[in-house]
Amino acid sequence: MRNPCVAHRGWSGAAPENTLAAIKLAMSMPEVQWIEIDVQLSRDGVPVVIHDYTVDRTTNGRGAVANLTAAELGALDAGSWMSPAFRGEPVPRFEQVLELTVGRCRLNVELKTDGRYPGLEERVLGLIHDYKLEHDTVITSFHTETLRNVRKLSKVVRTGLILDAWRNSLPAELAELGADFLSIGYSRINPERLRRLAGAGIETMAWTANDVKTIRKLAAMDEKLMICTNYPDRWREAIGSL
């Protein structure tokens, strides 16, 4: 299938981001091959799936993710902010997502850290190993030291750098990190840059394209370009017309 579809935080255009509801909805569309999620650590050291460093925006709670236990996070309402239909949707544990997706969908796991979560890499890799998902997962981060830590701990699991910028040194930087994946803001790419990345053996994902016109334009650059979107249905409309 051309231009693999990556559901951003699940099907987050139609269900609350980074919840089991959004992930289930994404998996209901057969063309969705990948789901992107964000992972942090709870106060008791459990990997949990949430984007912001605080729970304020997407739950009925207040405070830092790092100050709440996994049980406390799981008791929050992470759905009502979007619609009453999702009232009571919890902040999921990473393991719950693995249980749901194993054998059904691949995961782009963004480690949301700037170094504030010692042990995050080990705990996430441990769960990936437990579920035998080493070849169905890519771990990504804005934080280069996190990617170095992952590579020290695992020679198998793929890693990728996230950024919203372009510089000609990127292929060399990725090689130095032991990474073969680039997650980049879609406005930063063009056909020539994609050719350079492909020539260096780097797989590229463009984020976050949410309208049919943009998705179609990106797809025309390179049929192997992964396209991350909040709206997999719009990806289907765009790609189906090519």
Image (spheres, rainbow, N blue to C red):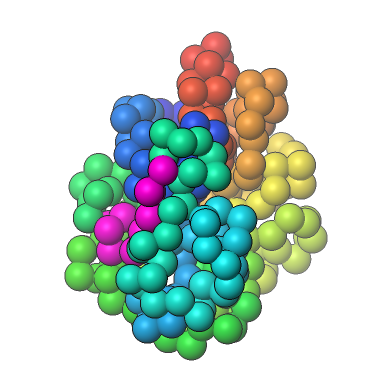
Q: How many marks?
A: 0
Residue at image point 39% right, 77% down? 69
* Relative to 207, residue 220 above or below: above
Q: Is residue 238 left or right of residue 25?
A: right
Q: Is residue 12 part of the magenta span, yes or no?
A: no
Q: Position of residue 178 (x, y in %)?
A: 52, 73
In which quadrant will I find the C terminus? Answer: top right
The span picked out in magenta is: 87-98
Q: Position of residue 213 (x, y in %)?
A: 69, 21
Residue at image point 54% right, 39% down? 82
Residue at image point 32% right, 39% down? 24
Q: Position of residue 141 (x, y in %)?
A: 57, 67
In which quadrant will I find the N terminus? Answer: top left
Residue at image point 63% right, 41% down? 208
* Relative to 6, residue 239 above or below: above
Q: Nearer the viewer, residue 151 or 196?
A: 151
Quadrant position of residue 63: bottom right
Q: Nearer the viewer, residue 239 or 223?
A: 239
Q: Nearer the viewer, residue 19 or 80?
A: 80
- Return the residue found at the far bottom: 118
Regarding residue 201, the answer to whether it shows in the image is no
Q: Is residue 134 left or right of residue 228?
A: left
Quadrant position of residue 156: bottom left
* Relative to 82, residue 48 above or below: below
Regarding residue 170, the answer to whether it shows in the image is yes
Q: Position of residue 41 (x, y in %)?
A: 44, 76
Q: Nearer the viewer, residue 8 or 103?
A: 8
Q: Is residue 101 left or right of residue 147?
A: left
